[in-house]
Amino acid sequence: MTKKYLTKLTYEIIGAAIEVHKIMGPGLLESVYHKCLAHEFKLRGIAFSSELFIPVEYKGLELDTQFRCDFLVENEIVIELKAADSILPIHVGFLINHMKLLEKAKGIMLNFNCVNLFKEGQKTYLSELYRNLPEE
């Protein structure tokens, strides 16, 4: 895994999300965008897991928390979808915790309830793991 690969994959993910937003526009339920984005990933040949169960362990006990991430793309980037008026700190906290629990270096928050997804509807987050990745 390299920073260059994650950057390329990020562009592919955001490109797919922009395509969904361009066709569907803002104002729909998150579940609609989820299905559309899954279909767009399939059309583009981007491997993903959807509604992936996230294991949580506490002192050797696996907890039944029902944590799920919206998408794990190419087993490397965690995607959190929203269709909200604004992204709250708790939404960011969920994404960061999902990245930590899945031990992933990068996550992307996508909020489809905006006018321009590229400018205002997406933000990338990096975990401590990212720092140690090679450039290429």
Image (cartoon, rainbow, N blue to C red):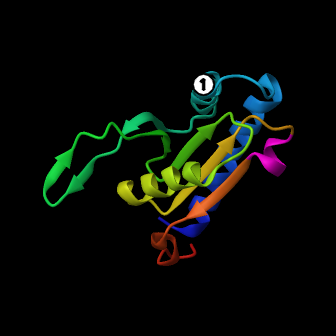
Residue 120 % position (x, y):
80, 49
Judge left or right: residue 56 versus residue 135. left
What residue is shown with label 1? 39
Q: In this view, does 71 lie above or below 75?
A: above
Residue 91, given in percent of the width and then of the height, sits at 57, 48
Magenta stretch: helix, strand or loop mostly: helix
- In magenta segment, residue 34: no
Specify the quadrant of the image occupied by residue 103. bottom left
Quadrant placement of the C terminus: bottom right
**What residue appears at the point 18 percent right and 48 percent down from the top-left corner?**
62
- The structure residue drawn at horizontal position 55% and vertical position 45%, both measured from the top left corner, is 79
Residue 111, position as x, y percentages in the image: 70, 41
The residue sitting at 57% across, 35% down in the picture is 45
Q: How crowded is mark 1: few (under 14 residues within 10 Å), some or many (20 or more)?
A: some
Residues in magenta, as a range: 116-121
Q: How many marks?
A: 1
Q: For residue 28, what is the image quadrant?
A: top right
SS for callout 1: helix
Q: Looking at the rendering, which quadrant does residue 107 occupy?
A: bottom right
Magenta stretch encompasses residue 118: yes
In the image as oriented, which residue stretches furthest toward the left?
Answer: 60
Residue drawn at 45 percent across, 71 percent down: 129
Q: Would you place residue 48 above or below residue 125 in this image? A: above
Report the amino acid beneath label 1. Answer: His
Is residue 123 rendered to the left or right of residue 46?
A: right
Please state the horizontal and vertical placement of residue 64, each as a whole percent of the image: 24, 39
